[in-house]
Amino acid sequence: MSVKVTTLPSGLTVVTDAMAHLETASLGVFAGAGARSEGEKEHGLAHLLEHMAFKGTKSRDAKRIAEEIESAGGELNAATSGEQTAYYARVLKEDVGLGFDILADILTQSVFDKDELAREKNVILQEISAAEDTPDDLVFDMFNQAAFPGQAIGRPILGTPETVMSFDRGAIQDYLDTHYRAGRMVVAAAGAVDHDRVVEDSARLFAGLPQGTGPAPTPATYRGGEHVEETDHEQANVLIGFAGRSYRDELSPALGVFTNILGGGMSSRLFQEVREKRGLCYSVYAFQWGYSDTGVFGISAGAGPEELPELVPVILDTVAETTRAPGEAEIARAKAQMKAGLLMALESSSMRAEQMARHMLIWGRPLPPAELIAKIEAVTADDVRKAGEALLASTPTLAALGPVAKLPRLDKIRTRLAA
């Protein structure tokens, strides 16, 4: 990878990766602030800001923003996560300048028009309703709230109807001024790009960003707990979780290997035991979400009400068995999956730009693929056991939605794990 990094006097970081064989470029502006940066009365404000950025600037209304990028065959998008907010453009190589001009315009010159704000609030209310009507999405919100009770990291990113409707232009502008600061933002570009040109454009177009880094998010602590709701859906969606690892934690790569062995694909223990051998559900998998100072590990499954009494004990026993005796062949297979996933992602210019920006915000430098692969290769069977033991030593989390009358509850899960 031909990665280059420049930090401007303002503190804004510019990172590029030129991919000479491409005719297109992926551009992004990444802010190291997301839902975790919200105060209690700001719940949903980070996501609303992401929406409002596209609704008009001092020189372009919402329609013109859409028409300019699409007339050039490009596309714009954005996403809000717990710790970051990203604004993307994908363009032909001759339109890189246009892409950056629009991104800079929406991030530094947005007007947050009153009428546009009223309309977009209604759009987000529809988005919230859609999420609440999707049980396999809603259960993840319930899971996060149970794992991180009373904390910003555990709240749904979309906010609530009450909080979203309470925001005015001043609240949005205050959040923007506080958190979208040059020292906490990264401009990333990959594909048909020239580093010096991107640096020049960034220095000119983002000169208006406030300097500094802004306040750090409140530290988060995994606590665990239970959030179960009975509904009349046909299937129960179940999540069982434990304390995970920060992506800075030395055990994070080992937990990644453990996660893959347990529930990372069709050869994983959970897929083979729960679906193939017993036929208890259609979908079952494990995941690990790392944050800057904490993490959460989980197992997701969907099953009918009659399968729940058998499903949960089988999942717990499989976690325990994987902790006791991870096989060398399984470890090798998990490492191969992780390495392939990493390298396949890097064939995409948009994924390269996103990964470089994420690394800059996390570690202050882009990690080369060889270094990432070396971390995976260094994981031993003992490391995998330690990662599993750390999971089982933490307080479990249970979230479930659907016909859950026969679901073993948190006290039964604790008893099973203790045994």
Image (cartoon, rainbow, N blue to C red):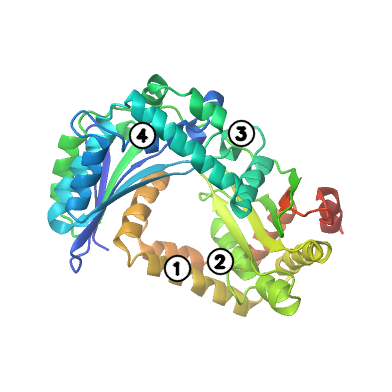
Residue pointed to by mark 1:
341
Q: Earlier in the sequence, mark 2 or mark 3?
A: 3
Marks 1 and 2 sit apart, C-alpha to C-alpha, by: 17 Å
In the image, which disc is placed on residue 52?
4
- Do residues under tags 1 and 2 come within 8 Å of each other at their CB atoms? no
Marks 1 and 3 sit apart, C-alpha to C-alpha, by: 32 Å
Q: Which of marks 1 and 2 is nearer the N terminus?
A: 1
- Mark nearer the viewer, 4 or 3: 4
Q: Earlier in the sequence, mark 4 or mark 3?
A: 4
Question: Mark 3: few, some, or many residues within 10 Å (few <14, many ≥20)?
Answer: some
- Mark nearer the viewer, 1 or 4: 4
- Do residues under tags 1 and 3 come within 8 Å of each other at their CB atoms? no
Compared across the picture, whether 366 is left or right of 327 comes to left
Q: Measuring from the top left, give residue 42's x and y in whole percent.
A: 50, 27
Q: Which amino acid does label 4 sit on?
A: Met
Q: Is mark 4 on a helix, strand or loop?
A: helix
Q: Which residue is drawn at 36% across and 34% down?
A: 52
Q: In which quarter of the image is residue 319?
A: bottom right
Classify 344 as above or below 33.
below
Q: Which amino acid does label 3 sit on?
A: Gln
Question: Mark 4: few, some, or many residues within 10 Å (few <14, many ≥20)?
Answer: many
Q: Earlier in the sequence, mark 1 or mark 3?
A: 3
- Do residues under tags 1 and 4 come within 8 Å of each other at their CB atoms? no
- Do residues under tags 4 and 3 come within 8 Å of each other at their CB atoms? no
- Depth check: 268 or 139 in front? 139
In the image, which disc is placed on residue 151?
3
Q: Measuring from the top left, give residue 113's x and y in whole percent.
A: 32, 26
Q: Which of marks 1 and 4 is nearer the N terminus?
A: 4
Q: The C terminus lies in which quarter of the figure?
A: bottom right
Marks 2 and 4 sit apart, C-alpha to C-alpha, by: 44 Å
Q: Is mark 3 on a helix, strand or loop?
A: loop
